[in-house]
C-alpha cells in the first residue's frame, strides 16, 4: 500500500493540505468501495468514522480548487519514466460515452453509442462524450498491451471544439510534458485529419477510408509563370487499387496481433492524401487475408520509414483502449459517481480514468510477474492478469493495512485475516 500512497503523493503540490487529504481518502475509498461507486459509497469505505462532513467530498469534486490537467501531467511523466523509459511512446486515441440519464447533468448530451450501434442500426444514448488518449504499455508477462489513460476531455453538444480539436489539444499538451520524446499516436479513421498539423516529434497511424481520393506527389516546379501544382496525377482509391494490383506485388509478413503471430499479405506505397495533408506524403498499407475470407483493409501512417509489419502491429494494439474503457466502466464504476453540477461530472469521469492508470502503474511496479490471482478450474487457460486482478491486489493491500492494524498477530488470526482479505479483494 505504501507504493500506492507514494504514487498519490506525487500530486501533493497541486492541492492544499485539506484537499490532498480528501483526494487521498476519495481514491482509496473508490478502490475499496463494494457495489456502485457513488461518492457516498466511497466515503463509507474511506471514512467510516465520519471525520469530516460528506459535503466536503462533494464540494471537492464539484468546486475544489485543483486542476485535472496537473494530475494528468504528473501521472504521465511518472508512467513514462517507470514503464517506458526508452524508445517510442505509443499512444492511442478514441472517444467513449459515459452514460448519465439525468436531464440536468452538466456537460451531458445525446450521442451515438458506439458499443450498441451496428452497421444497420444506430443507437443514441445520453451521457458524457469523453475524448481519451492512452499510453500503450507492454507488460512484463507479454501478451496484449495495456492502455493506461494519460489525458481526457469532455466534448459537449454544440461545442465549438470538435472531438478532433480536443484530441489535437491534448496531444500538444502531452508533447509539452514529454519534451525530447518520440510519440506515435494510433487512432481510428475518424481522427485521420490529425495528420494535417502534428506537433514536432509526433507520428500518426490511422485506418484509411476505402474511397479516399489519393494523388501522386506534387511535381517539381517548372519555372513557368502561374501557380505551381500542389498535387500530382489522381490515383485509384484504396479499394480500386487493391482490385487492380497483381498478386505478385503483395508480400507475406509475420505480424504481432495483440500477442499472437498472424501471417498476412501486405502492399506498401507512398501517396498524397490531399484531403488530410496537402503537402506531405503518407504511407499506405493494404492488408490482405491470405485465405481470402476477410476483405482487404487499409491503413496509413505519417512515418514514411515504418515497416508494414510495425504499422499493422501498432494499429492492432489500439484495441487495448477499448479494453481500458470497459474496465473503467465495469470494474471501477466510472458511470456511478453522483456528481451532477458544474465541473463535477467531468472531473468524476476523468478521476475514474486517472485511477485506472494509477492502479495499473502500482500493480506493474509492485507485482511485475503478475502472479497475484488464484488459478480456477473453470478458467484453466488464463495466463495473464486482468485489470480486475490488479484492482483486487490493490484492494487487498489497502484492506490489509486496516485489518492487520487492529488484529493480534496470532497464527489463527492470520488465517482468518487472509480469508477475509481474499474475499474482500474481489468484492465489488
Image: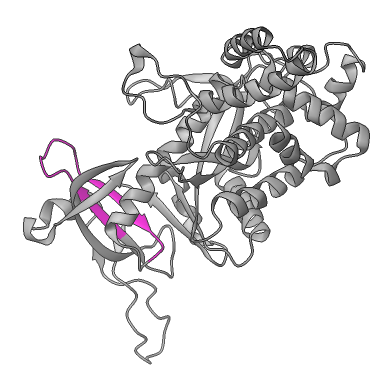
Q: Does residue 428 appear to the left or right of 42 in the view shown?
A: left
Location of residue 34 with respect to 67 vertically, above or below: above
x, y (%) of residue 53?
92, 15
Whether 344 is among the magenta residues is no
The residue located at (80%, 13%) in the rendering is 406
Q: Nearer the viewer, residue 187 or 21?
A: 21
Q: Nearer the viewer, residue 133 or 402?
A: 402
x, y (%) of residue 343?
78, 30
x, y (%) of residue 23?
81, 30
Q: Does residue 375 appear to the left or right of 126 in the view shown?
A: left
The residue at the far front in this view is 411
Whether 292 is among the magenta residues is yes
Q: Quadrant for residue 296, please give it.
A: top left
The residue at the far bottom in this view is 223
Q: Quadrant for residue 71, please give it.
A: top right
Quadrant location of the N terminus in the rendered image: top right
Q: Does residue 219 appear to the left or right of 389 in the view shown?
A: left
Quadrant location of the C terminus in the rendered image: top right
The residue located at (67%, 57%) in the rendering is 177
Q: Which residues are magenta?
A: 284-303
Q: Does residue 243 appear to the left or right of 25 in the view shown?
A: left
Q: How many marks?
A: 0
Amino acid at each position: 500500500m505504501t507504493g500506492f500512497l507514494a504514487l498519490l503523493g506525487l500530486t501533493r503540490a497541486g492541492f492544499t493540505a485539506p484537499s490532498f487529504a480528501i483526494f487521498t481518502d476519495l481514491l482509496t475509498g473508490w478502490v475499496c468501495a463494494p457495489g456502485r461507486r457513488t461518492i457516498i459509497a466511497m466515503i463509507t469505505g474511506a471514512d467510516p468514522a465520519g471525520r469530516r462532513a460528506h459535503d466536503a467530498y462533494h464540494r471537492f469534486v464539484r468546486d475544489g480548487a485543483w486542476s485535472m490537467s496537473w494530475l494528468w501531467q504528473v501521472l504521465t511523466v511518472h508512467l513514462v519514466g517507470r514503464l517506458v523509459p526508452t524508445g517510442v511512446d505509443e499512444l492511442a486515441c478514441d472517444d467513449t460515452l459515459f452514460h448519465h440519464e439525468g436531464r440536468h447533468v452538466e456537460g451531458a448530451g445525446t450521442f451515438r453509442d458506439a458499443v450498441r450501434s451496428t452497421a444497420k442500426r444506430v443507437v443514441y444514448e445520453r451521457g458524457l462524450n469523453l475524448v481519451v488518449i492512452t499510453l500503450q504499455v507492454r507488460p512484463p508477462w507479454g501478451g496484449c498491451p495495456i492502455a493506461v489513460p494519460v489525458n481526457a476531455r469532455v466534448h459537449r453538444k454544440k461545442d465549438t471544439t470538435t472531438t478532433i480539436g480536443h484530441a489535437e489539444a491534448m496531444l500538444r499538451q502531452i508533447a509539452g510534458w514529454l519534451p525530447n520524446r518520440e510519440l506515435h499516436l494510433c487512432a481510428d479513421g475518424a481522427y485521420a485529419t490529425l495528420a494535417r498539423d502534428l506537433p514536432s516529434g509526433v507520428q500518426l497511424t490511422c485506418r484509411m477510408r476505402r474511397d479516399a481520393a489519393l494523388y501522386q506527389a506534387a511535381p517539381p516546379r517548372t519555372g513557368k509563370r502561374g501557380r505551381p501544382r500542389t498535387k500530382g496525377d489522381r490515383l485509384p482509391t484504396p479499394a480500386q487499387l487493391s482490385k487492380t494490383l497483381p498478386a505478385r506485388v503483395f508480400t507475406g509478413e509475420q505480424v504481432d496481433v495483440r500477442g499472437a503471430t498472424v501471417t498476412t499479405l501486405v502492399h506498401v506505397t507512398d501517396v498524397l492524401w490531399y484531403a488530410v495533408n496537402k503537402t506531405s506524403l503518407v504511407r499506405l498499407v493494404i492488408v490482405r487475408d491470405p485465405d481470402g475470407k476477410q476483405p482487404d483493409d487499409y491503413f496509413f501512417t505519417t512515418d514514411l520509414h515504418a515497416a508494414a509489419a510495425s504499422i499493422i502491429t501498432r494499429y492492432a494494439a489500439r484495441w487495448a483502449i477499448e479494453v481500458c474503457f470497459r474496465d473503467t466502466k465495469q470494474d471501477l464504476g466510472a458511470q456511478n459517481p453522483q456528481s451532477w453540477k458544474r465541473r463535477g461530472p467531468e472531473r468524476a469521469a476523468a478521476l475514474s480514468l486517472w485511477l485506472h492508470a494509477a492502479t495499473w502503474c502500482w500493480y506493474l511496479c509492485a507485482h511485475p510477474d503478475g502472479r497475484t490471482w488464484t488459478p480456477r478450474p473453470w478458467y484453466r487457460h488464463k495466463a495473464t492478469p486482468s485489470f480486475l486482478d490488479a484492482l483486487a491486489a490493490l484492494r487487498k493491500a489497502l484492506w490489509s493495512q486496516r485489518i492487520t492494524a487492529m488484529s493480534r498477530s496470532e497464527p489463527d488470526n492470520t488465517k482468518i485475516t487472509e480469508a477475509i482479505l481474499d474475499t474482500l479483494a474481489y468484492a465489488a
